[in-house]
Image (cartoon, helix red, strand yellow):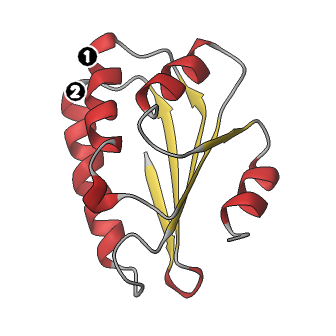
Amino acid sequence: MSFDVEPARDLVRITLTGFFTPDDVARFVAARDAAHAQLRCAPNAHATLVDMRAMQIQSQATVEAFQRVLGDPRMASRRLAFVVARSLARLQIKRAAAEREASFFTAIEDAEAWVLAA
């Protein structure tokens, strides 16, 4: 898991790989909060691009944990894009993000163009 924050563009880039446990999701939340602290924009005014092409299929408990994370309106992005592989993981993130307005892409360039367009 890695975070790259671009305060000048109000952009948070997240790369997720491998298999997560619910404890890993808790570590993700702490890292996300630290990344958000680097932003200079108002709350919820940033854009987020999540590259999860190398993420494995997750357990139901992990999908539910990410669903709770994504459902927190205090940390919601103005735009949220996921770059996903064509696999079951794509279906899992769509289910986890069902309560959020998000777009899904297979190419990072397309996701970046969309997330920065607004």
Looking at the image, which residue is at 37% across and 83% down?
Answer: 42
Horizontal side of 75 relative to 19 (left or right) equals left
Is 86 on the left or on the right of 91, as rendered? right
Quarter of the picture containing the N terminus is top left
| Residue type at tag 2 | Pro
Residue toward you, 74 or 65: 74
Q: Kindly state the secondary structure of the residue where label 1 is placed.
A: helix
Q: Is residue 86 left or right of residue 6?
A: right
Examine the rendered structure and indicate whether residue 94 appears above or below residue 61. below
State the image coordinates of residue 20 (x, y, percent, origin top left).
Answer: 34, 26
Residue 105, image quadrant? top right
Q: Quadrant of the C terminus?
A: bottom right
Q: Which mark is residue 75?
A: none
Q: Position of residue 65 (x, y in %)?
A: 26, 29
For marks 1 and 2, give the one nearer the viewer.
1
- Residue beneath disc 2: 22
In the rendered view, would you say 109 is above or below 97?
below
**Residue in the picture at 79% in, 43% down:** 107
Packing grade of label 2 (10 A; few <14, some 14-19, many >=20) is some
- The x, y position of residue 62, in whole percent, is 30, 22
Tell me which label, 1 or 2, sits earlier in the chain: 2
Label 1 crowd (10 A; few <14 / some 14-19 / many >=20): few
Tell me whether the residue at label 1 lies in contact with that at label 2, contact meaning CB atoms closer than 8 angstroms.
yes
Against 89, is 68 above or below?
Answer: below
Residue under label 1: 61
| Amino acid carrying mark 1 in the image | Ala
